[in-house]
Image: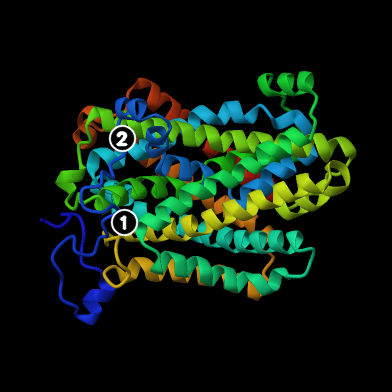
Amino acid sequence: MPPDRDQRQDPILRWLRKPVEVPGSEYERRGQKGEDTRRPTLAEARRQGPRGWLRVLGPGITTGAADDDPSAIGTYAQAGAQAGYGLLWTGLFTLPMMMAVQELAQRIALQTGVGLGTALRRKFPAWLVAAAVAALSASNIIVIAADLQAVAAGVELLTHGHLRTSWLIAPLAVVLVGFQLLGKYRTLFRTFKWLTLTLFAYVGAAILSHAHPPQVLAATFIPHVETSGQFLLLLVAILGTTFSPYLFFWQPAEEIDDQLAAGKLSVEERANADPAEIRSARVDTFIGMFFSQLVAYCIILSTATVLHNNGKTDIKTAADAAQALTPFAGEVASILFAAGFIGTGVLAIPVLSASTAYAINEAALIPASLAARPRRQPTFYAIIVLATAIGVGLNLLHVNVIQALVIASVLSGVAAVPLLILMALFGADRHQMGKRASGRLSRSVTWISTAAMALATVALLASLLLR
């Protein structure tokens, strides 16, 4: 089986002078002999019933869930607590943009047979891709630190202080990294998929908030904009949180990992996906993005109804929101809120560290796959360990990671805008994408998303400079 033509040998293996094994021998097989591990087509899913539709859901649904990490939940909670129902309409505004951007990232992988970083290296200068990846990596590490703290704070909240946040951060990181290093790919994939269910806790929290339907419907479908600095800052924060550039790398990489784990070891085998596969993957993406925005909507709705309407607006983190809900909505709502961000944090932290490793390795044309054994791709796994360790270190050094999230937002915007531009140009290139080149609708929505993200980043920088 020919190796991927774009990739070099792992640098750690080269330094250790390890012999190169038979190409593909490092990848796990997801199923037993004879077991069909493909994502079913939509026609197959209809014939198989609920089980078939569950098998359609994969990288898209986990990507949508990972977008609602504890840091994002904190942003949405602030939006609801401070602006009330005033920002409920943002979900309808951002949903088509999220769908277009993630569908493009996924389609690039399915057409080229490689991850996003490797694909972009085929068309654009290495320094340009590397600069965006560097900003992305720094942002990811700060968010890892914040999410580790948030999950630990959630556990402290649920145990009524018997387990302290500071005690839990390092052990949590060790468990999550150990799971990535030692767990089989099939176990990782299934665990990530099932962790998405924890976000339904926010649907429950929204129901328990007893919102007023007429007000909610009006705020959902009629955009409300204020000129106050605080409102605009919240709007910018929502845009920045929604378009997380690490997801641009995560979802395509998982599409490739699925194919590697199923035995498609060469680029030629993975490239040029057939139309039925593209349609099935697109449904996965659209459902994942809808789920992501539904959760964000429920968080804003519940915190607006319970906290804003009771004058509780001093929310900084997801843990603050969970704690503040108790006096007004009862302990069940607080537990649901905390359980939601603990579950998504356990999902998002590995996604953040792995997407950092994917981005760096792909930009450097080094093999990167969670479907590979760590001893066969040590550089990829070393970056996962290092990114998580730095996140732990920021907490142990008592760096204010909540304030550092502002820096992460700037870096995320700095990375997202050029990446969106490169993705849009790549997707429209018929030489690279062939018959899968972006159509008029995809191009239009992607460029609108790019413009919105650019404006959000400029607005955020201006607000910081004018403080």
Residue 244 percent location from the top left of the image: 51, 46
Residue 140 percent location from the top left of the image: 51, 58
Q: Is 57 in front, or is 306?
A: 57
Q: Judge whether 447 appears above or below 57 on screen.
A: above
Which labelled disc corresponds to residue 40? 2
Split into 4 quadrants, where in the image is the N terminus? bottom left
Q: Residue at x 28, y 41 (%)?
A: 38
Residue type of the residue flagged with mark 1: Glu
Secondary structure of the residue carrying numbered label 2 = loop
Residue 46 percent location from the top left of the image: 36, 25
Residue type of the residue flagged with mark 2: Pro
Q: Judge whether 165 appears above or below 429 on screen.
A: below
Q: Please rate how many residues cluster around mark 2, counting C-alpha atoms within 10 Å: few if below 14, some from 14 to 19, many from 20.
A: many
Q: Please rate how many residues cluster around mark 1, counting C-alpha atoms within 10 Å: few if below 14, some from 14 to 19, many from 20.
A: many
| Residue 348 appears in the picture as rendered | yes
Describe the colour scheme in one phrase.
rainbow
Q: Residue at x 21, y 59 (%)?
A: 7
Read off the residue under disc 1: 362
Residue 293 percent location from the top left of the image: 58, 34
